[in-house]
Image (cartoon, coloured by chain):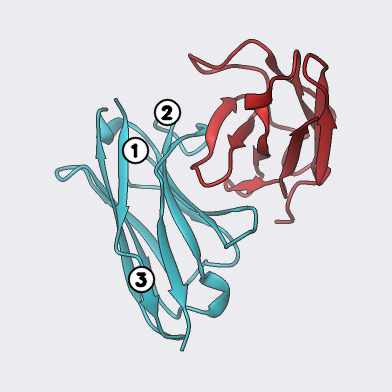
Amino acid sequence: QSALTQPPSVSGSPGQSVTISCTGTSSDVGPYNRVSWYQQPPGTAPKLMIYEVSYRPSGVPDRFSGSKSGNTASLTISGLQAEDEADYYCSSYTSTSTWVFGGGTKVTVL
Amino acid sequence: EVQLVESGGGLVQPGGSLRLSCSASGFIFSIYAMHWVRQAPGKGLEYVSTISSNGATTYYGASVKGRFTISRDDSKNTLYLQMSSLRAGDTAVYHCVKGLGGMVVSAIGYWGRGTLVTVSS
């Protein structure tokens, strides 16, 4: 199972919006609404931010939103804040009943 | 509060074996699927394995299939990963992760801090 494709980095100024794409295939992202997003600041464990494409766990700010179209999922961070600077990873359930992750995207707040 | 504490990592020679443990607390362990995910130093996340809530179903990533075995002991609230035929490419921090539900299709949810496994001679 090949990794999902994410841009290596995105950046934005405080208050702006940034969107991270996550491109998979017809064997993972495409047929399943089982895409999740994780935030990982340096030196910490990943934290679930979005699950099942667009649902936020309790405690995650509503500035974070998720969507999916075809084989590509997206995470949007609105009203970017300094504390949002971190690595972000997507993941998807696959047709082999396993999970696959994206390569990660570094979000920089300018 | 959900707590996942991994242990058992360390330095092992190529070809060797190691068993990781994950002690869970703060939730009803027996009703949740559990996962192992690893992260090589400076690299991204890589899926390792999943076990369903009843332990009857297990899945593995292609790079570890046939070498690693996931299991659970609900009486001890503990998840295990038995690793054998270890290679340098298995060097990583191994995270224990709680699923959001009992089925393997449930999202990979809450992460432990991980335990470092180093495979080197």
Which of the two discs, 3 and 2, labels the residue nearer the N terminus? 3
Q: Which residue is mark 3?
A: B10
Q: Colour of chain B?
A: cyan
Q: Colour of chain A?
A: red
Which amino acid lies under the numbered mark 2 shown in the image of this protein?
Answer: Gly
The image position of residue B46, as x and y in percent, is 59, 54
Above or below — where is B21 with respect to B105?
A: below
| Residue that appears at 78% across and 27% down | A74
Q: Quadrant of the N terminus of chain B?
A: top left
Q: Which residue is mark 1?
A: B53
Look at the numbered disc 1 and give the secondary structure of its residue.
Answer: loop
Q: CA distance from mark 3 to mark 2?
A: 31 Å
Q: Which residue is mark 2?
A: B101
Give the farthest residue toward the bottom: B121
Which residue is more in the foreground, B76 or A31? B76
Which amino acid lies under the numbered mark 1 shown in the image of this protein?
Answer: Ser
